[in-house]
Image (cartoon, rainbow, N blue to C red):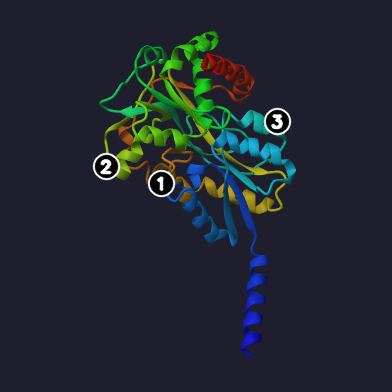
């Protein structure tokens, strides 16, 4: 009888597991870490959805889109979390994504009307360094200085691509000359943000390509006020990070529910102290103490989606040519 009871229990457990829908979310590495927003998102959504959320990491943001393009309609992903405004044009052209059906009262500094991609956070790109270290105020001043920098590869990383578009928008036809001048400052180019920021923290470079919100982590989580983000005279380039449902998902209603959930209080209140970015929808309690100390660029820069898509390939070739010399 005991064996029959065990067998029956195993059968019921198997049936329950089979009846629990699974939502597979592709995202970038740092989001799914134990200190990132991934665990909060997973735990809070599973409380309401009756499902299992599985995060699959694929490097940095640009690597996510590359992987999805390779997998096409065969992908196991139901949702991708971590593309951005620089990738939205290419993502839309791929035909891999479905309209979101999401409505939200966004707190973004730009109007948002896209029906497919759902913003979940935003920020300004910036070079981050020590408060007692080099603090150039422009790309030209950076190139003229002895400051060493770590940057991310624009082919695999959204901060890397953001830097590429930042230089292109600020300098236009002079962008190749800026890259040639910066080449001597670059210590290395990493595949993604996590590797670059880690090298900076290890003292391998004076500055790292990151965000104006990065010092908030050190200030709030570590009580460390020695990190600062630089506002450049040319302006600082903006990023809006987005999520989208795959058109091939076999869980379309669950995917739409997840996207709507991302804009809600549970996720948005966690973003400033887990992903260390500005929330796309300001939570009821506002921003955490410490955010008021952050650098706010005087001149925000952001190419429209179509313009960013059109500029990408030429800007990438200019970057590669300059760094190859």
Residue 133 percent location from the top left of the image: 28, 24
Nearest the eye: 165 or 194: 194
Residue linked to disc 1:
284
Does residue 127 appear in this view? yes
The residue that appears at 64% across and 53% down in the rendered structure is 254
Answer few, some or many: residues within 10 Å of disc 1's Cα (few below 14, many 20 plus, some between 14 and 19): few
Going by the picture, which residue comes out furthest to the bottom?
Answer: 1
The residue that appears at 53% across and 11% down in the rendered structure is 176
The residue that appears at 59% across and 62% down in the rendered structure is 50
Q: Could you say which quadrant of the image residue 221 lies in?
A: top left
The disc label shown at residue 223, or none = 2
Does residue 115 appear in this view? no
Q: Compared to 206, does 218 lie above or below?
A: below
The disc label shown at residue 93, or none = 3
Residue 90 percent location from the top left of the image: 66, 29
**Image quadrant containing the N terminus:** bottom right
Q: Secondary structure at mark 2?
A: loop
């Amino acid at each position: 009888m005991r064996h029959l009871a065990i067998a029956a229990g195993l059968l019921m457990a198997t049936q329950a597991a089979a009846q629990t829908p699974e939502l597979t979310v592709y995202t970038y590495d740092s989001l799914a870490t134990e200190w990132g927003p991934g665990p909060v998102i997973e735990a809070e959504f599973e409380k309401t959805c009756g499902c299992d959320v599985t995060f699959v990491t694929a490097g940095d943001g640009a690597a996510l889109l590359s992987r999805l393009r390779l997998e096409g309609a065969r992908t196991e992903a139901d949702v991708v979390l971590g593309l951005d405004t620089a990738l939205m044009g290419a993502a839309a052209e791929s035909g891999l994504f479905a309209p979101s059906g999401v409505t939200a009262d966004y707190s973004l500094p730009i109007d948002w009307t896209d029906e497919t991609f759902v913003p979940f956070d935003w920020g300004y790109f910036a070079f981050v360094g020590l408060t007692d270290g080099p603090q150039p105020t422009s790309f030209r001043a950076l190139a003229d200085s002895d400051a060493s920098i770590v940057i991310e590869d624009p082919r695999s990383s959204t901060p890397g691509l953001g830097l590429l578009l930042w230089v292109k928008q600020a300098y236009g036809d002079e962008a190749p000359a800026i890259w040639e001048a910066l080449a001597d400052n670059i210590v290395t180019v990493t595949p993604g943000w996590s590797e670059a920021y880690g090298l900076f923290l290890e003292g391998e470079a004076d500055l790292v390509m990151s965000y104006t919100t990065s010092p908030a982590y050190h200030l709030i989580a570590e009580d460390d006020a020695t990190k600062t983000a630089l506002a450049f005279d040319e302006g600082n380039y903006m990023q809006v990070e987005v999520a989208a449902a795959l058109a091939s998902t076999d869980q379309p209603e669950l995917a739409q529910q997840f996207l709507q959930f991302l804009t809600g209080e549970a996720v948005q209140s966690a973003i400033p102290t887990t992903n260390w970015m500005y929330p796309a929808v300001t939570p009821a309690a506002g921003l955490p103490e410490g955010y008021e100390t952050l650098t706010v660029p005087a001149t925000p820069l952001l190419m429209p989606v179509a313009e960013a898509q059109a500029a990408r390939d030429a800007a990438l070739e200019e970057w590669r040519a300059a760094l190859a010399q």
